[in-house]
Image (cartoon, rainbow, N blue to C red):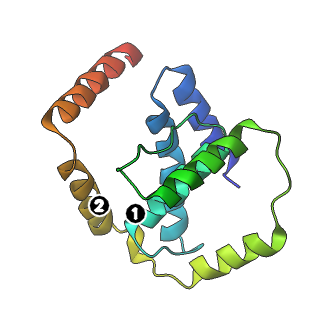
């Protein structure tokens, strides 16, 4: 369950007209903090980011599931399930399953949230984007930045 502060910051981003990925960034940040403070670990930076995005979708952030080809079919389906859970009334999560997931994550390392691991992950993601794509997102960032000032 995400912390109340995180949900509030994401809602504030939504009110300011920021993109769903920016709203989801709050949940990813929270996940990195959890790993750094030793609540649990993650196998890689990619997994840590994925956990944050999943939490964001379940908390109601309208972050679309990845397009086909971008990730595996399994990841797409999971993202769609998370989105559905964020829109429908909540059922109580399985206590046994939650405990099993937490226990598994506690066994993983803590280096997934290191600056080095996050930097490497960011670089590998950016390398896959086209020049036009990068340019468009930079322009949008400049637009939203000027709006909030």
Instruction: Name the residue furthest left.
Output: 131
Residue 88 x, y percent position in the rendering: 77, 38
Could you tell me if residue 30 is visible in this image?
Answer: no
- 125 up-or-down from 19: above or below: below
The residue at the point 53 percent across, 54 percent down is 52
Residue 102 x, y percent position in the rendering: 66, 74
* Residue 36 marker: none
Which element carries disc 2, helix, strand or loop?
A: helix
Q: Nearer the viewer, residue 105 or 148?
A: 105
The residue at the point 75 percent across, 72 percent down is 97
Tell whether label 1 touches label 2 (CB within 8 Å). yes
- 109 up-or-down from 114: above or below: below
Q: CA distance from mark 2 to mark 1?
A: 7 Å
All told, the count of numbered labels is 2
Could you tell me if residue 121 is visible in this image?
Answer: yes
Left or right side of 68 for 119: left
Name the residue carrying label 1. Answer: 46
Check disc 1: other Cα within 10 Å, few if <14, some if 14-19, many if 20+.
some
Residue 3 x, y percent position in the rendering: 67, 51
The residue at the point 49 percent across, 52 percent down is 28
Residue 13 x, y percent position in the rendering: 52, 29
Which element carries disc 1, helix, strand or loop?
A: helix
- 61 up-or-down from 128: above or below: above
The residue at the point 49 percent across, 20 percent down is 17
Left or right side of 13 for 118: left
* Residue 121 marker: 2
> Looking at the rendering, in which quadrant would you find the C terminus?
top left
Instruction: Name the residue furthest right.
Output: 92
Left or right side of 97 for 134: left
């Amino acid at each position: 369950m995400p912390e109340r502060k995180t949900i509030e910051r994401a809602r504030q981003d939504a009110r300011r007209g920021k993109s769903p990925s920016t709203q989801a960034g709050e949940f990813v940040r929270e996940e990195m903090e959890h790993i750094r403070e030793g609540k649990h670990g993650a196998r890689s930076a990619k997994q840590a980011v994925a956990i944050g995005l999943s939490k964001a979708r379940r908390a109601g952030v309208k972050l679309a599931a990845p397009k086909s080809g971008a990730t595996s079919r399994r990841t797409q389906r999971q993202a769609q399930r998370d989105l559905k859970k964020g829109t429908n009334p909540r059922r109580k999560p399985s206590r046994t399953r939650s405990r099993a997931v937490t226990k598994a994550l506690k066994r993983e390392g803590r280096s997934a949230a290191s600056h080095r691991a996050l930097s490497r992950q960011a670089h590998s993601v950016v390398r896959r984007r086209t020049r036009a794509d990068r340019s468009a997102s930079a322009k949008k960032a400049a637009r939203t930045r000027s709006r909030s000032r």
